[in-house]
Amino acid sequence: MHVVVPYRVSDPKTRLAPVCSPAERETLSRAMLADVLDAVAGAGHDPTVLATEPFDIPDGASASVEVDDRPLSVAVNAVLCDRVERDSPVAVVMGDLALATPAALSDLFTTDGAVVFAPGRGGGTNAFVARHPEFRTDYHGASYRDHRRICADVGVTPRTVDSYRLGTDVDAPADLVEVLLHASENGRTRRFLAERFSLATGDGRVTVERRE
Ligand SMILES: Nc1nc2c(ncn2[C@@H]2O[C@H](COP(=O)(O)OP(=O)(O)OP(=O)(O)O)[C@@H](O)[C@H]2O)c(=O)[nH]1
Ligand SMILES: C[C@H](OP(=O)(O)O)C(=O)O
């Protein structure tokens, strides 16, 4: 299976700007990418990072890099076109799945189906496997709904894996709570965040606050 991890190199994770400086967003984004690459490797696959510009893979992680500066869906569709049409399945795993584990990814990779989704909370498509030559992506917005429509258009009944770990992408400040609670203590993302933030409990939902 060809496993692709899309990655925007410059000015990443803008929705975290209310709580993280530009430099922190960049370091956090690289930490998440490294953790995702480790999880893919742990599931037995060699990942390829589909990057918007050339960059160095974070120390300790391992991956090939393919550069495509076109918009996300165009770049991913080019890979699907190239690979799946030649009968080679493709998995696309977003680089911000800080809770991903080899086991969670293996469940996705080994689920039979022409198209198998790991939906994200909030409407996105955090990961999928495509084995059908005509499936294409249309990311952003409620892409999980849109991707199901695209499946219907090409006559595919998609399958979905039920995964808290793959369903949790780190987009907004509230998602940092999930990382502090559930990411591996040895992972780069958790270590980076735990140095800067702690959980704040009160009457409502748990949030994060800056350490003194
Ligand atoms: N190759 C490629 N990857 C992208 C692009 N946009 C986002 N990504 C990656 O896709 C994954 C999901 O990204 P998003 O959460 O939608 O966007 P983001 O850029 O990380 O964060 P925001 O600025 O807050 O939207 C992350 O691994 C990003 O690095 C793009 O245009 N091209
Ligand atoms: C790329 C986008 O990610 P989100 O905005 O949901 O993080 C999506 O999954 O469509």
Image (tube, grey):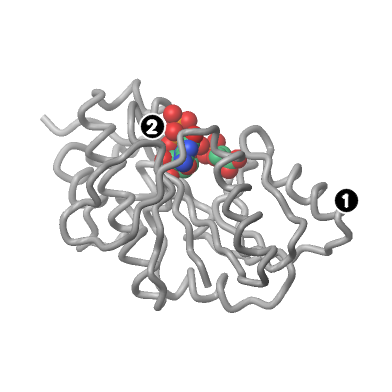
The disc at residue 153 is 1
Residue 178 in percent (x, y) is at 39, 49
Residue 44 in percent (x, y) is at 40, 78
Q: Tell whether 153 sits left or right of 165.
A: right
15 and 152: which one is in front?
152
Give the residue pinned by disc 2: 13
Residue kind at label 1, given as amino acid type = Asp
> Is residue 49 shown above or below 88?
above
Picture quarter with ligand 2: top right
**How dense is the environment of label 2, judged by Cα within 10 Å: few (below 14), some, or many (20 and up)?**
many
Identify the image quadrant of residue 201.
top left
Nearer the observer: mark 2 or 1; the answer is 1
Q: How many marks?
A: 2
Mark 2 vs ligand 1: CB below 8 Å: yes
Quick one: SS at disc 1? helix
Identify the image quadrant of residue 109.
bottom right
Residue 10 in percent (x, y) is at 33, 29
> Is residue 119 shown above or below 207?
below
Q: Residue at 21% x, 51% y: name it.
A: 58
The disc at residue 109 is none
Is residue 170 visible from the viewing direction of this image? no
In space, the residues marked 2 and 1 are separated at their CA atoms by: 32 Å
8 and 160: which one is in front?
8
Quick one: SS at disc 2? loop
Q: Tell whether 92 sits left or right of 46.
A: right
Residue kind at label 2, given as amino acid type = Lys
Q: Residue at 24% x, 59% y: name it.
A: 187
Would you say the residues marked 2 and 1 are in contact, meaning their CB atoms lie under 8 Å apart? no
Q: Residue at 27% x, 44% y: name it.
A: 30
Q: Tell whether 101 sits left or right of 197.
A: right
